[in-house]
Image: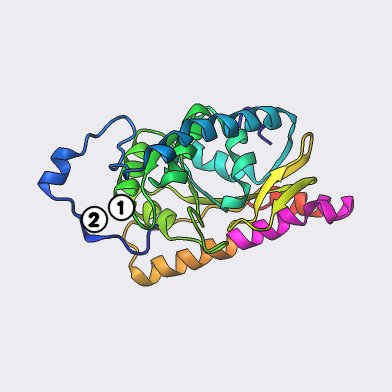
Amino acid sequence: MTPANDPTSQSVPAEAAAPTAGDQAAEKVGVHFDTRLPQLPWSRRIQIPIIAALVFSVIHILGPTLRFEVLGWQHNEKVFASGRRCIWAFWHRVIIPVVWWRRNHGVVVMNTTAFDGQWTRKVIEWMGYGTAQGSSSRGGLRGLAVMAKRIEEGKDCAFTIDGPRGPRYIAKPGPVMLARKTGAPVMVFHIGCQRGTTFQKTWDHFLMPHLFSKTVMVFAPPIEVPPDADAALLESKHAEMQRELERVRDLAEGWFSLSEPERNQHRSTIAGNH
């Protein structure tokens, strides 16, 4: 078990897939290899640092009180021992505990360039993550190219796999595409909280853990995608990722309703799942 402090695009516009020479010249590529951000009115721009600071503060107040139990981490350790990196995929619902758990490890996260993505980017970068700017609607392939480069440099990557706007619990294919390109496996997981509030009116059923809540983090075995995978195999791997995301979600969400003997049985099964 690793402690808390140690541990995509289905359609892309033609200009995102093949930018012109003029676009490339006009686009300043910085440390995060950003796509150009959309223009926002000043009333929206001024909200970005304010929202980011508030969310960052909430995470730093809440995070240290959470108690993590991590199941299946041995799958990640085996990937690291083989000299490879991980492509993590999880539902947007649990982004708050995830951001705290893997902070300050340089994990590169796919991040939308829309308004929500701009303040989110500030928060996750302050938490020690990198970002690759792109989404299912804008700059997705360029974001994947950045992630591939970061994996080559020895960084792990992560996707909020039903983000940035849903549909909820429908996985996008970005991790599978990245796995084929890089040879890194897809590692899916979910977090369940003993005590927390679900915001039912949000598209993702956003989960806010309560202070001092116990949490369980469940990892599935790696999903390997060969570099010569054809369209049929990519579709099959995408479906496998969807199934595993649903399986670990159901287990983690129901964890604290299980009896201790039932939890121990799952612990033994996961520990022996090599």
Would residue 224 be visible to someone looking at this image?
yes
Would residue 111 be visible to someone looking at this image?
no
Q: Is residue 256 magenta?
A: yes
| Real-space CA distance between mark 2 and mark 1, rounded to the nearest whole angstrom | 6 Å
The correct choice, above or below, for 56 with respect to 69 in the image is above
Q: Residues within 10 Å of mark 1 (few under 14, many from 20)?
A: many
Residue depicted at 76% across the width and 49% down the height: 267
Amino acid at dot 2: Ala
| Label annotation for residue 130 | none
The correct choice, above or below, for 264 with respect to 65 in the image is below
Query: Which quadrant of the view contains residue 211?
Result: top right
Do the residues bearing badges 2 and 1 touch, measured as CB atoms within 8 Å? yes
Residue depicted at 55% across the width and 29% down the height: 53
Q: Secondary structure at mark 2?
A: helix
Nearest to the observer: residue 183 or residue 260: 260
Q: What residue is disc 2 on?
A: 17
Query: Which quadrant of the view contains residue 83?
Result: top left
The correct choice, above or below, for 274 with respect to 59 in the image is below
Residue 199 at x, y percent in the picture: 68, 53
Among the two numbered marks 2 and 1 on one chain, the one whose residue lies closer to the N terminus: 2
Q: Which residues make up the magenta segment?
A: 245-263
Magenta span: chief secondary structure: helix
Q: What residue is disc 1 on?
A: 141
Query: Which quadrant of the view contains residue 30?
Result: top left
Nearest to the observer: residue 113 or residue 247: 113
Q: Is residue 265 left or right of residue 220?
A: right
Q: Is residue 223 left or right of residue 112?
A: right
Nearest to the observer: residue 178 or residue 1: 178
Amino acid at dot 1: Leu
